[in-house]
Image: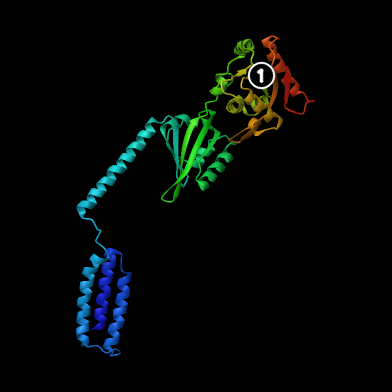
Amino acid sequence: MIFAVIGFWLLMIALKYARLKKGVWDIFWAGLITIFYSLVLFETVPFFLDPAWIIYLGALGTLLFFNLGSVIKGKDDSLSFKELESKYQALVKSSEQLRTRFLGTLDVLEDGLAFIDDDGAMFLTTPALTLFNLDDPELSEATFIERLHPDDQPALKDIRAKAKKSQKKYHTKYRIQSGQKYLWVEETGLYIKVDKTPMGVVQLRGAEVRMFPKTAVDVLNYLPQESDLDAHLLRLHTEEKPYRVVAMRLSNIPGINAKYGRDVGDMMMGEFLKKMKFHFMKEDAIYRLQGILFIMVLKDLRKADMLEKALKEDSSLLQTTVDMGGINESVYPYFGVVHVERFDAHALDVKAKAVGALKEALTEDLQDNYSIVEV
């Protein structure tokens, strides 16, 4: 009989645990009472009640403990069917709103997007299909990489593999086949985890590089020309305030054009000039005299001194390296600097002196890549 009571007790505990997820103390008290029952039944410990009464009271206590314990230990958090249905409808509505917003975002984006699953399956949005001259939005990542220029395939595989492992944002450029030609593409991507599975989200846009002199590299497109430089020098001479004229020649760009194409050379020149403007110029301008010959006019003498210090220390401020696809090249600039402190000579002579200083820097006799003269 005692085993029946014990079994009934444990059954009540199991039901309560399934309902409330709280049964540790119940099991403790069940074990303690079981030991007490056993001691009384086997007359190890004297007790004033008959064992039959103990069994009866134990069974009754079990029922009371089960019902009262539900209140003491916690409450039943289970929801009614109507409440569950209401929660489900709210989740469905929220999910539909997210889906609609996502699809709307895809419709207004001008740049292409690609989604890469863990198994290598890719899905491209319409702007990306147009960019790559494709019809089917679904293809494998391997097929996509096969369309790249052979020199750029290893670099893209490597950068995506590293991004997948680190889950950090990356940016790269490469050449991919579009119709009968190769197109330069900028890719910005990030790998995220969905249900513990990595998925790549990639933004794709054309690098917008065309043949020189017409190019979409803005810093090249909108540079003022030599006639603008002459007018500027004449104005500065009338103001009689000290300034610096810096002639720059990007000596290895012709070789890069021959090796990779003029579009690559344009991009590298653009990156170098943007760096110059960022570090050393505010309202001052860069003028283009010839294909790879540029002149900076610096009215801010503090910035000019910073430039000369960078030249003398071979600073990283002047080093520009372009790493895209299978291309890793640096720009090798030479500088001719003129300090304009006097204004008795003709203004346009300053331009000739800057070009002359640059030619001196280009001679094999000079170890440095710059020459500085005073006027």
Asked whether 82 or 123 is in front, the reply is 82
| Pointer 1 local density, CA inside 10 Å: few below 14, some 14–19, many at least 20 | many
Given the current orientation, which residue lies at the most extreme right position?
365
Q: Is residue 40 left or right of residue 172?
A: left
Asked whether the viewer can see residue 251, the reply is no
Image location of residue 334, percent across then percent down: 70, 25
Q: Amino acid at mark 1?
A: Val
Image location of residue 169, percent across then percent down: 50, 41
Q: Residue at x 52, y 44 (%)?
A: 163
Image location of residue 213, percent across then percent down: 58, 18
Image location of residue 82, percent across then percent down: 20, 52
Q: Is residue 98 left or right of residue 365?
A: left
Count the marks: how many? 1
Asked whether 120 or 304 is in front, the reply is 304
Q: Quadrant of the C terminus?
A: top right
Q: Quadrant of the N terminus?
A: bottom left
Q: Is residue 304 left or right of residue 52?
A: right
Location of mark 1 (residue): 245
Q: Is residue 217 left or right of residue 258?
A: left
Instruction: State the SS at label 1.
Output: strand
In this figure, which colouring scheme has been used for the structure?
A: rainbow
